[in-house]
Image: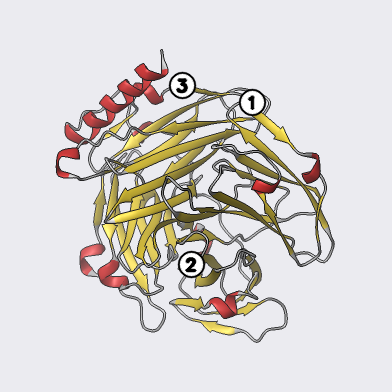
Amino acid sequence: MTERAREMLLAAAIVTLAATGLLLEATVAEQRVPLDTESAAAFVDGATYCPPLSGVDGVTEEIAVASLTGGPALVSLNEGEVGRRLDSGLLSLDAEVAKQAEVVLAHGQPVAASASITSTKRARGRAAAGCSESAAGRWFFPSGTSAIGYDERLLIFNPFPDEAVVSISFVTPTGERVKSALSDVAVPAGQAREVRVNSFITPHARLGAVVSAVRGRVVAWKTVLAAPKRGIEGVDATLGATAARDTWYFPEGAVGKDVVEELVVLNPSQRTATVTISLAAGSEAARPPGLVNLSVPPLSLRVVSLPRSAPRAATGETVGVSAIVASSNGVGVVAERRISYGARSREGVTSELGATTASGSWLLLPAGRAERADALTILNPSGENARVAITFRRPNGSPLAPEELQAVSIGAGFRVKIPVLRWTMGLPVAIAVDASALVVAERSSYSKDPADASDLMGVPVPSGVRP
């Protein structure tokens, strides 16, 4: 099948998905859902690692911290600081405090944390990235670029008392690219290194990256500042993935006249991977023929663009679509979604790695500033209908559980998107999601100054630490 024929089939399938509600070949509900069966031991204390502040001029950062259970905790920033009390709500650390907040220490309850990044000079925009509860030996970033007008940075943090050494390699649609200058990068104890990708490789429109620890363990993030002469300005950021998986879930997503969504699949192994992408809307689910059994060669990446032909283009609307990327031959992959918005009402870029598990309980931290829009998207990939209860954990005040959000129905294999700005009011509010089935939750926001969209995957709450 030619690429043109594949694109035509895919476009037709998505139009059918949004307009007629027919199920094509198989539904999302047939996908295998990893069970959230891991129980956590009694919590004493622990560290969460947040991205160091970038050295780019005009970039600032804020940190949000929330208890996984909603119970009280003491939170310290790095060793030696007096603990700050964290109750049921969210602790927001402004830009000045966040400069010193690479390590968030929690006592009494496990916490989750995220970073909101704002750029006001070279490339104006906002982004959000998750913090990590652990360091690792490898970090994967499928979606990146070294094209002219884009500035990609890899932020590598070593939280331990001994020096770490890492090597960085790149992955393109045609194979791996190894640079000798990045084969032995030292990361001092307790410090961070920022690697400007464009300084080490020629321009590539599609460029994945792999950070491998030669000695020690590290935590790695990616930021991309986009300021092309022709294209959409904005900032995206993400925490890397530590391993390849069989299944990746993306609750948020859209197709339409002014939206471009790409799913980038990286294969870090020595075997060819075969993947299938399933799509889900509010009441329809499909596995379009153009997205079935796609080959991803060893040590390469594949970019899958959803068509720009909007099913509701006549009214200027876009259609929300969730996606599941699944390997069908046992070869694990890493998948990342990139969305570009070009409408006046919503513009900017986002990039987010998929979730690798479904859970009955989620905690969602702010996806950056949300002056114009704040929304929660929940995908139900299970084989049973789900009922969802949503609670807002405000910075100062008791939790808010609106009656109309205590029994939200999501059909098996479908998704729902819930605007929540009327309850969050643009403030840093954490959101707890509890479901009767295994679901996946993601949060999205939009700000106007600077204009940019931002997405942040939720944090699954292990059954052993739930209230």
* Dot 1 or dot 3, earlier in sequence: 3
* Dot 2 or dot 3, earlier in sequence: 2
According to the picture, the residue beneath numbered tag 2 turns out to be: 120
Q: Are marks 2 and 1 in contact (CB under 8 Å)?
A: no
Q: Badge 1: how crowded within 10 Å, few (<14), some, or many (20+)? A: some
Q: Position of residue 320 (x, y in %)?
A: 29, 45
- The local secondary structure at tag 1 comes to loop
- Looking at numbered disc 2 in the image, what kind of residue is underneath it? Thr
Q: Position of residue 101 (x, y in %)?
A: 63, 73
Q: Badge 2: how crowded within 10 Å, few (<14), some, or many (20+)? A: some
Of tags 1 and 3, the one toward the viewer is 1
According to the picture, the residue beneath numbered tag 1 turns out to be: 298
Q: Nearer the viewer, residue 124 or 40?
A: 124
In what quadrant of the picture does the C terminus appear?
bottom left
Question: Residue at the front extreme?
Answer: 229
Numbered disc total: 3
According to the picture, the residue beneath numbered tag 3 turns out to be: 293
Which residue is painted at 43% across and 77% down in the image?
A: 89
- The answer to whether residue 238 shows anywhere in this view is yes
Q: Position of residue 356 (x, y in %)?
A: 51, 44
Q: Could you say which quadrant of the image residue 424 lies in?
A: bottom left
- Looking at numbered disc 3 in the image, what kind of residue is underneath it? Asn
- The local secondary structure at tag 3 comes to loop
The answer to whether residue 362 is left or right of residue 212 is: left
In what quadrant of the picture does the N terminus appear?
top left
- Looking at numbered disc 1 in the image, what kind of residue is underneath it? Pro
Of tags 2 and 3, the one toward the viewer is 2
Q: Could you say which quadrant of the image residue 368 lies in?
A: bottom left
Question: Residue at the left extreme?
Answer: 315
Residue 396 numbered tag: none
C-alpha distance separating marks 2 and 1:
39 Å
Q: Nearer the viewer, residue 237 or 341?
A: 341
